[in-house]
Image (cartoon, grey):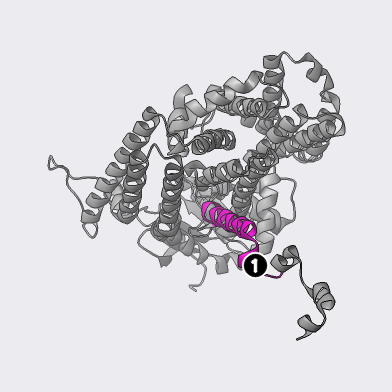
Amino acid sequence: MKWATNPKRFMQKTLTTAQFKNRLPFETRTPARRGLLFRVLMGLLALWLGCFFGLGAAGIFDLDEGLYSTVARQMVESGNWIVPRVGTQTFYDKPPLFYWCEALGIRVFGESAFAVRLPSAIAAALTALVLWWWCKKQGKERMGWLAAALYVFCPLTFVLAREAVLDSLLTLWLTLAVVAFIEAYRSEGRTKGRAYLALSIAAGLAVMTKGVIGVLLPATMLLFWLWLRRDKTEARRVPWLLMALVVGLIIAPWHLLMWRATGQEFVREYIVHNHVQRFLGKDFAHNAPFWSYAPVLLVGLFPWSVGVPLSWWQGWKARHADGSSLDSALGIWALWAAVVVIFFSISKSKLPSYVLPAVPALCLLIAVRLEALWTKGTGLVRLEAFAVGVVGLLLGGILTFVGVVGWTWRGQSGAMMWAGKPLSPNLVEPIALLSPVMLGLGMILLLGCGWMLLRWKTPFQVVVAGLLMNAGIIAVLAGVGLPIWNAADIAPLHDMARKAIPALEKGDHLVLYRFKPSRPSVRFVVGHAAQVAETGDAAQLQRDLEGTHGGLILTATTQPLPALPFRVHIQAANAAWTLWRCEPVSHPSL
């Protein structure tokens, strides 16, 4: 044999141990790579389920989603990307960056709920990846995976990732601003300058997404941190003028063009009304007391919300650590969460979504503590385990009970209370409709929180149970709940509205009459902004129709029409909505 007759040649041909391993199959030679591949696949699965699953399962919701989506569609149709409009009215509520993102989605995917919600989903996924990347940079990759998973599976996150509203995109920019400040504070030389530049860019983009809070919140965090640290040296090293210039260069063009196009009305409506008066709680219906965000955070971060006080306090205690240490960075994250929650608690105007920018920081602080418990092999505090069990089992029991009761109401025309009094159909019908969803959610909460309570001494099992529980909740809500609600409430209206499109294309007008509450999503569905009006006044309805010599009226089936000087007949109808055709008396019947 050749190897026996020529041993020198054999030695030349023989592979080294390392070369031999490199020629082995992938499964044999790279267990580390298999582990990395598994983590990547699980991360992508978490992002898909938390942010993208069921994104187009329901039509456009109202009120805000309908307004913002309509603005974006009108930008695409009109070619005017400077002045936001809903119908013929200028829409001063917010700057245009989110509308632009929605409009790009419409350009690529058409006029659909998926297209306008995609920016929110992408922003939520990118925020999770920012948390993972930052932790990995600190040498804490496992903590990063955990923080990212906690964030995308938080109820507040996965709900807002499926709505075409501004908060997910704003949260991305503000999270980047916090990361940039941490890197600037812990760095020297050019790295410090680049980090402060990144902070300025993120703040400018945040302003272009939701107004002045985009720069006010990061600036408050920065100033408070320097004051807490009594760090006059760093205060002198911050390039204040350059940062202000960068923010100004980002936000000035649109604001100047908008002011030039609309004049003093822009100052009055955009600056005074939608910034100053909104903060003070004037002229807006969603005012709420100071403590409102306590229950929002309890539910919005559940089940991890029970660990927020201790996790935040551990981060806050680290604020005086060495400036270049990880502990110091955790102090900045804790300060950021406090700034956001306190700022919006002071504001008179409140919506649950406003507090979302604090959630990434809170998830990271929770991940730090869970990872430490995981490493040490110690369990949760007894009070935390008790709180998870009580809250989860209580919520799960209530949902299960209501789901069972609602299931018995399905197919019934009415229901009675124990005292023999009839219940309102407005209560019975939604409960009966959503009874499968409530049953599913109730059972998931009972199983998940029950297991977390039983295994509270084993951090790994607690983390897995909590993530699987929230993943199940997402699957039920997005996979079952949204389609059910869409079929019952959204699709009937939008399908009826689409029947008006052929007439609108011929130049007719459509009046939305006495919609309670307002449903601006109809405008997004039908387009033709200049030909759609909305009114709740009978005299105004007649004037709108007389100005167009007739047209179409869309209203609730139970809503009678006033006397009109037109020939009126039903063009289409379903159980909830009716589309009327109005023609001048002298007009020949079609």
| In this view, 76 is above or below 256 | below
Residue that label 1 marks = 26
In this view of the protein, which residue sits in the foreground, 397 or 142? 142
Q: Residue furthest left?
A: 420
Determine the residue positioned at 55% across, 36% down. Answer: 359
Magenta-colored span: 23-52
Going by the numbered disc 1, the residue's amino acid type is Phe
Q: In the rendered picture of this protein, how many numbered marks are placed on residues?
A: 1
Q: Quadrant of residue 130?
A: top right
| In this view, 48 is above or below 379 | below
Q: Dot 1, how many residues are within 10 Å of its Cα: few (below 14), some (14-19), or many (20+)?
A: few
Q: Position of residue 152 (x, y in %)?
A: 54, 46
Q: Position of residue 252 (x, y in %)?
A: 80, 36
| In this view, 30 is above or below 417 | below
Q: Quadrant of residue 245?
A: top right
Q: Can the viewer see residue 287 in this picture? A: no
In this view of the protein, which residue sits in the foreground, 189 or 362? 189
Q: Position of residue 270 (x, y in %)?
A: 67, 33
In this view of the protein, which residue sits in the foreground, 544 or 459? 459
Q: Residue furthest front?
A: 5
